[in-house]
Amino acid sequence: MDTQSYMPVPPGVGLEENFFSLDDILLSHQRLPCRTENAFPRLGFLEKSSETPDILEGTKMEMPLWLAKGLYERKRRVLSVDLPKMYREGWRTVFGADPNVVDLHKMGPYFYGLGSQLLHFDSPENPEIAQAILQTYIGRFRRTMDSSQNAYNEDTSALVERLDFLERTLFREGQSGLNSFQQWERGKAGHLTASSLVTNYRKRKINELQE
Amino acid sequence: MFCEKAVELIRELHRMGDGQLPAFSEDSIRQVLEEMKALYEQNQSDVNEAKCEGKSELIPTIKFRHCCLLRNQRCVAAYLYDRLLRIRALRWEYGSVLPANIRFHMCAEELEWFNQYKKSLATFMRSLGGDEGLDITQDMKPPKSLYIEVRCLKDHGEFEIDDGTVILLKKNSQHFLPRWKCEQLIRQGVLEHVIS
Amino acid sequence: MSDAGSDFSGEDGSQEDIMTPAELIAKLEETWLNERFSPELLENKSEMVECVMEQLMHMEENLQRVKKGDVKASIHRMEIDRIRFVLSSYLRSRLQKVEKFFPHVLEKEKSRSEGDPSFLSPEEFAFAKEYMANTETYLKAVALKHMPPNLQQVDMLKAVPEPCLDCFVFLRVKERQENILVEPETDDQREYVVDLDEGSQHLMRYRTIAPLVSSGAVQLI
């Protein structure tokens, strides 16, 4: 709508990341289990357990997605990336049985985003991962949508608690649509209000004064 | 790990999802720039060693550091860019004069960006024709009625309406005013739209 | 399809000259809705904007002549407010897109061949150039110039996302269309063709029907 003036750069779609998107930067900060396929001399200090000056070949360590993506090469193996447990077969079966029971916030919170990003690394299980995240999304979509369309004027924290980041965005969209519709129905669409930026700044100022 | 400070910057903005502008983190930025300088210098010397002494085993390390440099660059650029989007929003919500407590959160270059943005926007609006152009920061919602009932939330002083009448906006006073004249004052929280 | 006499949506200026005020306002509303609902910046309609501005001034003048307290006056005032809202909202959505996509908008303008209509009005073009320069100066001054020499540039074309043309839009068909090719949604679907009947409404991928929006054959709703 016209009324919200701060419009952040949205996250990229699918395999894409948007350079300026804060969400994508936080997503790519998620850690992946990796194994070094050659040594990284002089970087041993990054690995807490190691006492050598180098990161040795065959070291198992967690790396943020951005680094794994930057180092990964198809031709020359510098690094291999393992699947985090929620994308492995065991968990995929659980998701397949009933996607609604899992707490994707705890597992994520970027469950879909990270899953899509994993497709950058040539795992033989890629097709299954892609299917699993798609089916999980579809399987949970209805509930997410229904709850966002039916919770009016109530505390929604319990409803969004177990939702992944993408689902939360969807939920919020649904809520804002519902609220605008209710406002319109009650003939209040023309009601002029103070900008939320202004009111929030004022709240902050009051808090600062009270401290 | 490298780049922790840089992602801190991003988290700090991300926590304020509604678009508020936190104080400019000059110190964190300086620390990220220092880390970048160190990474770059280490890479320079390792590149020389790899070239001159044929130490090709250093290449993965050089690449590792380069990834970190790119990451730091991205985080800082994204931090600054997102702040611009917030500062832009302030122009639309507050008008062209910002309250001091917000200006206080901006660095000198941000104030300059804001002033330039303000100017560009004003030039654009003036060029739209008519005597004074068209102020497109008004009329944010479709009009339902010509006049609206408003309550004054703080002392604002004198205020002129269309026909030249001047009224005094005193705290807690209530008025019946042309809607399009009040819109901005309502957004700024000076007036409150009263609906019966 | 439609007889020439009633077709005022024509692209050339000579036809636009004979638009009545009511037709002008209807045109403004169509253009406004299309711009609000399309993910990308549409072709500029500077001429229409100019006409509407003139119309508004004209109405204001007329209003001065009407006696105060006359019921007619408040109806006219209301009408002026309504038109000004639509026009502002239209220009606002355009400016928002210019800000959101500035490197791409400017690139498109650069690669436009002579004689092709411009997507930006001259004023929007000036605004976009200033916005780009202002933003680049800022990034450079605060941080980039303090970075190592190979990292002092950010490619704005890559950094600022492009409009997402794959989003879905609602539309109403104004002129019947045949054989519109619809891309498959999933790997096991195939592409297929649809006919769009006049007056029918659809939810479709924007990319598929973008040319029909600019030709005026469909209206986004």
Image (cartoon, coloured by chain):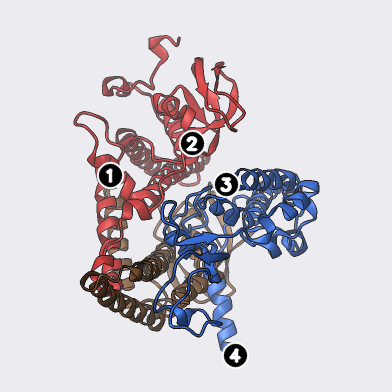
Q: Where is residue C85 in the image (x, y as percent from the top left)?
A: 46, 45
Mark 1 vs mark 4, CA separation in Å: 50 Å
Amino acid type shown at disc 1? Glu
**Residue in the picture at 45% in, 40% down:** C83
Q: Chain under label 1? A: C
Amino acid type shown at disc 2? Leu
User: Helix or strand or loop: what does disc 1 sit on?
Assistant: helix
Q: Is residue B132 visible?
A: no
Picture quadrant of residue C60: top left
Q: Residues within 10 Å of mark 4 (few under 14, many from 20)?
A: few
Q: Which of marks 2 and 1 is in front?
A: 1
User: Helix or strand or loop: what does disc 2 sit on?
Assistant: helix
Mark 2 vs mark 1, CA separation in Å: 25 Å
**Residue in the picture at 61% in, 89% down:** A210
Please tell me the colour of chain C.
red
Please tell me the colour of chain B.
brown
**Chain letter for the blue part:** A
Mark 3 vs mark 2, CA separation in Å: 19 Å
Q: Name the residue under label 3.
A: B144
Do tag 3 and tag 2 residues touch (Cβ < 8 Å)?
no
Q: How crowded is mark 2: few (under 14 residues within 10 Å), some or many (20 or more)?
A: some
Q: Name the residue under label 1.
A: C107
As drawn, is C20 to the left or to the right of A165? left
Amino acid type shown at disc 3? Lys
Q: Which of marks 3 and 2 is in front?
A: 2
User: Helix or strand or loop: what does disc 4 sit on?
Assistant: loop
Tag on residue A211?
A: 4
Tag on residue C33?
A: 2
